[in-house]
Amino acid sequence: MVKKWVVMVALTIILVVGCVYESKYIHSSFSGLINSLETLQIEITENKEKIDTEELITKSYNLHDKWHKSIRGIKCMIWHTGVKDIEVGFARIAAYVEENEYADAYAEIASLIDYIAHYLDDFKISIENVL
């Protein structure tokens, strides 16, 4: 009888520790992306008429590359449809910046920030997420 309780408690502890680790990892990865998106949003706002500079185009593509690097560890933890939606958002941002479409680029960045923020809410440490 005692062995069963020890096993159950050990499994519960492993489950909770795993959930905490998953939440922290996703939070740190997505928080960095949100900060980068907010920085890009500020930079394109500084010169609304000319956002297709080489510097901003490079930054938008670098942000997309940063997403590709961080996704390797995240793919096993989040829904693949969400990964696809975020991927499409980064591709649109890069295209809008390259085409000098300020309003579309700004809206896409704001939309992607909101989408990622909702992901962060889904992976907060809570009883619902543990169970």
Image (cartoon, grey):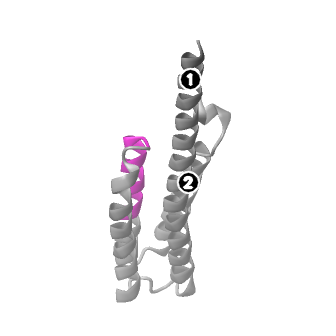
The local secondary structure at tag 1 comes to: helix
Question: Is 61 placed above or below 114 here?
Answer: below
Q: Main secondary structure of the magenta part?
A: helix
Other residues around mark 2 within 10 Å, as few (<14) / some (14–19) / many (≥20): some
Whichever of labels 2 and 1 marks the residue nearer the N terminus, that label is 1
In the rendered view, would you say 77 is above or below 7? below
Frontmost of labels 2 and 1 is 1
**Residue 83 included in the magenta stretch of the image:** yes
Helix, strand or loop under label 2: helix
Q: Is residue 120 left or right of residue 80?
A: right
Q: Residue furthest top?
A: 1
Residue 121's place in the image compared with 49, above or below, is: above
Looking at the picture, tell me which residue is in the foreground, 28 or 104: 28
Tell me the amino acid under the disc marked 1: Met
**In percent of the image, x 59 and y 27: which residue is there?**
9
Please state the horizontal and vertical placement of residue 76, each as a whole percent of the image. Answer: 37, 44
Q: Is residue 89 magenta?
A: yes
Amino acid type indicated by mark 2: Lys
Q: Position of residue 83 (x, y in %)?
A: 39, 49
The answer for how far apart the CA atoms under marks 2 and 1 are is: 24 Å
Q: Which residues are magenta?
A: 78-91
Horizontal side of 126 relative to 12 (left or right) equals right
Give the residue at mark 1. Answer: 8
Q: Pointer 2: what residue?
A: 24
